Image (cartoon, rainbow, N blue to C red):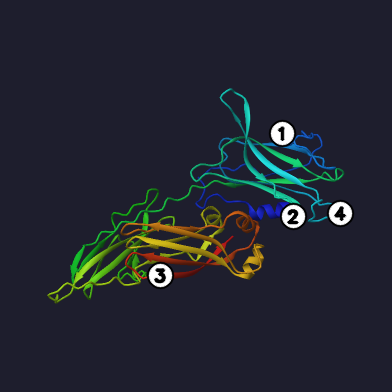
Amino acid sequence: MRLILALVATAVVAAIAPAAAGAATTPNFAFKHNETNGRTGPTVAGGGERSCAGPAVCTYEMHEFEIKPGEENGAFAISISWAGLPGQEGSDTQNDFDLYVYRVVTDPDGEEVEVQVASGATGGTTEETASLLSSVNAPIAPGKYRIYVDNFKVDPSTQEWEGFAAFEPFAVVNQRPLAALAAPAQANVGQIVTLDATGSTDADGTIENYAWDLDGNGTFDVDGPSPTHQTRFGSGGRKHVGVRVRDDDGDLSFAAQTVEVAPAASPPRIQEIQPPPGSITIDVDARQAFAQFALRGVGASVGCPTACEILGSLRVSGATARRLRIGRRARNVAVGRRELSGEGATPRLALKPRGRVMRRIRRSRRSFSAIVRLTVTADGYAPQTFTRRVTITR
């Protein structure tokens, strides 16, 4: 069935790290129209009254399910699908259903109260989907849930619809490491300088790799497991050095320092050395999982030696836009801006599509590529523009 295939391909994923050992999700299940399952009219979901225009039926059905204690769900998606009236596909007079999901809780007086947690009521289609994501730190709450299917069908003789509920496992999101870099404020040409990142920490794991940018050009010249590195500067001036740390889950963090290097034969005057334009660093993973993209969007980490502003965009080609059914021409699907102050700032900019665009992307079953474009302006530095191609993999 089209609904079940589409739902399996577009189920929402709430986290990217492996789920806790032994944790189970709520089993997927199918459900469908049932003449005896609480169907009544002209009330709609929640017991409210709704007036109906013309021959509309305006009835509803209620189906219950339970998330049991110990079932750890990161997301669920409830979908229904039905056939339109013959010869009326896509018109305003086609059969129409709305979908709502409520959690049943107990109020202070001991009464059951329904709290809406998801809905699907787009109209003009022959299917609806209602999805719920967990929080970052906890799975979806266990307990009783109710699915309401509101019926605004013009033709009461074609009441049939089918539904499916799919559950995704909860996963703990990795905490990013915290990079720290110590370096002498001053040095001489040819002097051995020790760069020390032993102050870097990872709250939920270990730091596995240290990569060093020794000339401030945004490229990491050497990397390895050691938290310290020794180098020499061959010329005087203001030198920018940086470190990128990677934890055991692959997340990154950056830190930077400036070293004033005295020339071998210092002239008897003060010389102002302008910072090089390439002292801003950027890191964007070329391949990113759709689970991470659905939760946080495409992430870009930027190292700024001083206060900086980041403007970013995520752009897809015309061909990609057509495959994802979000338009016919190349377009920006997400934009973002970050502004931080302070030496050694390492902001992370998340570029995540919103609204209808994100819903269409979730329904797609294909990987796709996009272009990340970042413009970074730091105090005292020439603006830098970076362009990276990323692939979102299913």
Q: Nearer the viewer, mark 1 or mark 4?
A: 1
Q: Amino acid at mark 2?
A: Arg
Q: Is residue 135 visible?
A: yes
Q: Residues within 10 Å of mark 4 (few under 14, many from 20)?
A: few
Q: Nearer the viewer, mark 3 or mark 4?
A: 3
Q: Which residue is mark 2?
A: 2
Q: Nearer the viewer, residue 271 or 36?
A: 271
Q: Amino acid at mark 4?
A: Pro
Residue 146: give x, y in percent of width and height: 67, 36
Q: Are marks 2 and 4 in contact (CB under 8 Å)?
A: no
Q: Which residue is mark 4?
A: 86
59 lies above or below 239:
above
175 lies above or below 321:
above
Residue 384, numbered label: 3
| Residue under the point 65% across and 65% down | 327
- Cα distance, mark 2 to mark 1? 32 Å
Q: Quadrant of the C terminus?
A: bottom right
- Chain-order first, disc 2 or disc 1: 2
Q: Nearer the viewer, mark 2 or mark 1?
A: 1
Q: SS class of the residue under badge 2?
A: helix
| Residue under the point 73% across and 50% down | 123
Q: Residues within 10 Å of mark 2 (few under 14, many from 20)?
A: few
Q: Nearer the viewer, mark 2 or mark 4?
A: 4
- Cα distance, mark 1 to mark 3? 57 Å
Residue 48, numbered label: 1
Q: Amino acid at mark 1?
A: Gly
- Chain-order first, disc 1 or disc 3: 1
Residue 83: give x, y in percent of width and height: 81, 51
Q: Residues within 10 Å of mark 1 (few under 14, many from 20)?
A: few
